[in-house]
Image: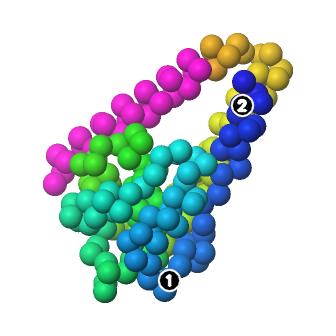
Amino acid sequence: MKKILQQENAAYFKLPTFEEIPDVGLYLEQTATFINKYLEPLLGSELTPSMISNYVKKKMIARPEKKQYSREQIAYLFFITISKTVLTLDDLKLLVKVQRETYPIQTAYTYFREELEQTLLVVFEEQALSFEAGERSEQKVMLYNIIIAVAHKIYLEKYFQLVRQRN
């Protein structure tokens, strides 16, 4: 199992910094390709142009100007694509709304990027070390990760419930 985790290299996954995201404006296909280049090693699934268009229709990201997506829109797409693995689109839409009311996109994206990278490093390195040292069985590590995922999902559901009650 340790070799699989190391081969996946998820522990060393890096998103582009906000400044590394193109600010020249990318067309729909270019935007999908750019994002997929980074996310494929982590998620293994693709962000499609139709998914991007759907996020625009749902007003999760702004309409492109002259059919080109800006740095800010691409930053949102990174967040949405990763977060939709655990959140519903309705919750994501609410979360984006809360973020817009709280922090500028550059600040929010930078925080998200740094926390994601640090958390992946801790989780994958911790798991690899546990298997190596024989402290916990593979099954116990998997159970631990399920419990953590469930606890975080419950927390998020309660959070969104409170936010909806306030609005």
Q: Earlier in the sequence, mark 2 or mark 1?
A: 2
Residue at figure coordinates x 77%, y 30% from the top left = 3
Image quadrant of residue 26? bottom left
Depth check: give the residue in front, 37 or 87: 37
Residue 121, x across and y down, in percent = 69, 44
Residue 4 marker: 2
CA–CA distance in space, label 2 to label 1 = 36 Å
Residue 121 placement, left or right of 156 = right
Image quadrant of residue 58? bottom left
Q: Image quadrant for the N terminus?
A: top right
Residue at figure coordinates x 40%, y 40% from the top left = 86
Question: Does any portion of residue 109 appear in the rendered image?
Answer: no
Residue 48 versus residue 128 in the image, above or below: below
Here the colouring is: rainbow
Residue 129, x across and y down, in percent = 79, 29
Q: Image quadrant for the C terminus?
A: bottom left
Q: Which residues are magenta?
A: 142-167
Residue 77 marker: none
Label 1: which secondary element: loop
What amino acid is labelled 1 in the image?
Asp
Q: Residues within 10 Å of mark 1 (few under 14, many from 20)?
A: few
Label 2: which secondary element: helix
Residue at figure coordinates x 56%, y 26% from the top left = 145
Question: Does any portion of residue 139 appear in the rendered image?
Answer: yes
Is residue 117 on the magenta stretch?
no
Residue 79 placement, left or right of 110 = left
Is residue 148 on the magenta stretch?
yes
Depth check: give the residue in front, 57 or 87: 57
Q: Which residue is mark 1?
A: 23
Q: Nearer the viewer, mark 2 or mark 1?
A: 2
